[in-house]
Image: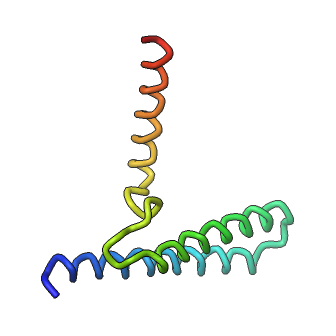
Amino acid sequence: MNRGDHRSTDAAALRLAAAVAEIEGLHAALLHTVEPGRRKRLLAELARAAERLAALAAAPPARVPAQARGNSPRQRRRRALLRGADWLARRLG
């Protein structure tokens, strides 16, 4: 195994750990929630987090699922801004 493989393995392990931690946090919040609306939202978020974890776990080692790549809030805002700019350019141009 060369150094690049090791880094990608470390990154994949970190992504898996983050997905598991997200599920643990949502589960803990769900256990302490009594409000029905919040419970429903937490259950929906928990389902989405479980889908992300399943996608990460099922992905081949060298391939990272799209939702795991560049998913920071800053990058999501940037992509949204770029989509908006493209939409405006198509409408005005």
Image quadrant occupied by the C terminus: top left
Q: Nearer the viewer, residue 38 or 49?
A: 49
Residue 93 sits above or below residue 76 on the image: above
Residue 53: image x %, image y %? 53, 75
Residue drawn at point x = 48 percent, y = 29 percent: 84
Q: Residue 27: which quarter of the image?
A: bottom right
| Colour treatment of the image | rainbow
Q: Position of residue 17 (x, y in %)?
A: 44, 81
User: What residue is drawn where x is 47% and y is 20%?
Assistant: 88
> How many numbered discs, if any?
0
Residue 2 vertical position relative to residue 19 in the rendered view, above or below? below
Residue at figure coordinates x 80%, y 64% from the top left: 40
Toward which corner of the image does residue 61 lie, by quadrant?
A: bottom left
Relative to the observer, which residue lies in front, 60 or 24?
60
Residue at the far bottom in the pictured view:
1
The image shows residue 66 at horizontal and vertical percentages of: 43, 59
Which residue of the protein is positioned furthest toward the top in this rendering?
92
In the image, is 76 to the left or to the right of 7?
right
Q: Position of residue 38 (x, y in %)?
A: 78, 63
Q: Could you tell me which residue is drawn at 47 percent across and 74 percent down? A: 56
In the picture, measured across the screen, residue 81 lies left or right of residue 42, that is left
Within the image, what quadrant is residue 10 found in? bottom left
In this view, which residue lies farthest toward the front?
Answer: 60
The front one of 49 and 26 is 49
Quadrant showing the N terminus:
bottom left
